């Protein structure tokens, strides 16, 4: 049983399902400046920052697909955008170096703003009208600020979810010693 719980996919579901419930209930009602906060997006980017491009893409796709299953948007839209955001978040940082927390926050904020721009553009590209408006700039700013602050808690949580240990992150790759 312990081996099952220690798998990254199971840990991601154990944290992702309550986060999805929080996203669709409480955060959908608490809308500062009329904008819904995007915790699932922050978790996707935080997974990339914590574990690298592969872990970020995996977590972003899984979390985005879970989010798509409760939305009325086209299935796979959030999975595509969140997976890409997680990959870019992991690509921005090396998993072998310890990053300062403020830099993680800046990365989460910047990529959140970019993802909030890319999502309506992709939706418009596949034929869903009405997502691109002048309100988009306000949404990008508010979500970026929220996700920048939330990253202080989300990045360590995603490090636990994807079973990234600090000693593994700081150790050089094994092929260096061959």
Image: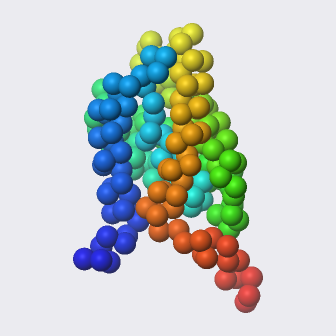
Quadrant the C terminus occupies = bottom right
- On the image, the x and y values in percent for residue 41 come to 48, 40
Q: Is residue 174 above or below residue 102?
A: below
- On the image, the x and y values in percent for residue 14 come to 32, 57
Residue extending farthest to the bottom is 178
Q: Is residue 1 above or below residue 60?
A: below
Quadrant the N terminus occupies = bottom left
Q: Residue at x 53, y 68 (%)?
A: 164
Q: In this view of the protein, which residue sits in the foreground, 175 or 56?
A: 56
Q: Could you tell me if residue 84 is visible in this image? A: no
Residue extending farthest to the top is 134
Q: Residue at x 57, y 18 (%)?
A: 138
Q: Is residue 13 left or right of residue 105?
A: left
Q: In this view of the protein, which residue sits in the foreground, 160 or 125?
A: 160
Q: Residue at x 64, y 64 (%)?
A: 95
- On the image, the x and y values in percent for residue 114 come to 61, 32
């Amino acid at each position: 049983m312990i081996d099952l719980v220690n798998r990254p996919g199971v840990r991601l579901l154990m944290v992702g399902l309550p986060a999805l419930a929080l996203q669709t209930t409480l955060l959908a009602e608490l809308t500062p400046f009329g904008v819904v906060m995007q915790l699932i997006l922050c978790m996707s980017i935080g997974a990339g920052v914590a574990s690298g491009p592969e872990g970020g893409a995996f977590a972003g796709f899984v979390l985005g697909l879970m989010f798509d299953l409760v939305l009325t948007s086209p299935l796979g839209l959030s999975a595509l955008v969140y997976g890409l955001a997680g990959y870019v978040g992991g690509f921005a940082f090396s998993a072998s170096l310890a990053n300062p927390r403020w830099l993680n926050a800046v990365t989460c904020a910047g990529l959140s703003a970019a993802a909030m721009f890319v999502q309506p553009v992709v939706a418009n590209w596949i034929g869903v009208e009405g997502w691109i408006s002048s309100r988009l700039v306000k949404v990008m700013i508010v979500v970026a600020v929220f996700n920048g602050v939330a990253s202080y808690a989300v990045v360590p949580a995603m490090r636990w979810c994807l079973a990234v240990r600090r000693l593994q992150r700081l150790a050089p790759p094994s092929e260096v010693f061959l």
